[in-house]
Image (cartoon, grey):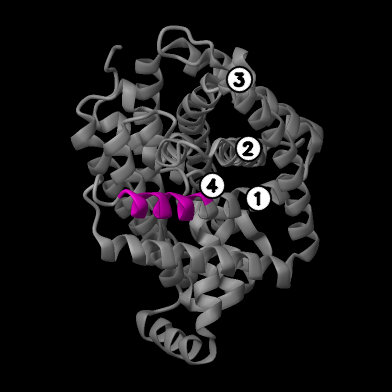
Amino acid sequence: MAKNLGFKEILAIAIGGMVGGGIFTILGISVSMIGALAPFAIALGGVVAWFAAYSYVKLGLYYKDEGATYAFFKRTYPNSHMAASFIGWYTIFGYISTLALYAYTFSSYGISGFAFGDSELIRKIVAIGIIWLFTFINIWSVKGMGKIEDIMVYIKLVILLIISLALIFFAKTDINTFSSMIIKDFHTTPIMSILIVSSVTFVAYEGFQLVINAVNEMEKPNINIPKAIYSAIFLVALIYFIIALSAVLAIPAEDLIRNKEYALASGANDIMGNFGSNLVVFGAILATSSAINGTLFGSSRQMARIADDGYLPSIISKRKGSIPKMAIIAMATIASLLIGIGGLRLILEFGSITFLLVSLLMAIANFKIRVKTDSSNIITIISIIGLLLGTILILYYEYIFNLQQLIFILILYIVLSIGAWGYGKINIKLLK
């Protein structure tokens, strides 16, 4: 199998999978809950992501399996066929839901400057169109996909850095005032709220796992998997902190809360005029594009791997060389259907909970075979405790603030569980 992906491409996939528009949506939520402490809580979410990544890296180096989350659990617990089916279905649908939201966010920014910017129909058409554009790119060439990801990721990082520095430079809030805000908010904000924001923020770091899905197509996996994942998390946490800090310094809190994902564009427009808002829009378009591209690439490999084992329809496992053509098409088709149906923000919360939950399961699996993976007992236990706490906190957040949304998520889990149970039963019969 051709090794078309070097370190630059692998790092781009990891960063592209993480910086996909999440930072644009979590700012308002974070500021509404903890005020000036938001940048620090968002950075703390990066620490949670690092601990989650530790087990993924260890398991990825040990198994070297493109099935990643699903395959790690299945191979660590070889007799738990039903559980493997459930995890496979939950994880793939989590990726599909984030893929749909990335596309919808791309569309929202992409048509925002046109007269038809408020048209829901056009927004959905553009969102579906961008998914299929990257579908064809992913089917066309692994090397071509990697080079395109390189260009989009590194340009968007430069743009986000420029936006952040400009906001800080023109900010009306000076450091002394900001320090006073931090001290005030620290004394008045419950620790629970800070931890909840860090847990909710975890979805903005989701995507580093996509690196492991490319293990069969990357150069020097023993070096590049840990190097790319840890580097990406550090860089993304730093970027998120700088963006959040610049937004809090330059944009009034009420605007951040009211304008939600458009807050950065609105704030940049107030400071730099149309050039500033257009720069944010372009950055958001690149961010969501690279996330769509990276998510399609990585998660389609995992989906094909699940189909190989009989937990999804066998047609999904068909490949063109190393490219899982039918899995890519299947993901694009389901994501397009979700966009057409709507309610994507509800589905995104499903993704947040799912990725925290499966990261917890990966930490537990790594602890089980910690001697084989040469893992630190202390780091692995801290990972388990941190991810368990994060899962509980995000469920608590949904229960308090979005009970209806939590009920919807539970119903979605039930529907997926029925499908996973059916395929799990079929697989067990075949094995017998």
Q: Is mark 4 on a helix, strand or loop?
A: loop
Q: Distance of mark 2 from mark 4, alpha carbons?
A: 19 Å
Dot 2 crowding, Cα within 10 Å, few <14, some 14–19, many 20+ = many
**Which picture quadrant has residue 126?**
top right
Residue type, label 3: Leu
Dot 1 crowding, Cα within 10 Å, few <14, some 14–19, many 20+ = many
Disc 3 versus disc 4: nearer the observer = 3
Q: Distance of mark 3 from mark 1, alpha carbons?
A: 31 Å
For the N terminus, the quadrant is: top left
| Magenta region, residue range | 358-369
Residue type, label 4: Gly
Residue 364 among magenta residues:
yes
Q: Can residue 297 be seen in this view?
A: yes
Q: Distance of mark 3 from mark 2, alpha carbons?
A: 25 Å
| Frontmost residue, 29 versus 300 | 300
Disc 1 versus disc 4: nearer the observer = 1
**Which residue was labeled with disc 3?**
430
Residue type, label 2: Phe
In the shown orientation, is residue 143 left or right of residue 92?
Answer: left
Dot 3 or dot 2: first in sequence order is: 2
Dot 2 or dot 1: first in sequence order is: 2
Dot 2 or dot 4: first in sequence order is: 4
Residue 93 got which mark?
Answer: 2
**Which residue was labeled with disc 4?**
21
Q: Are the residues at dot 2 and dot 1 in contact (C-beta closer than 8 Å)?
A: yes
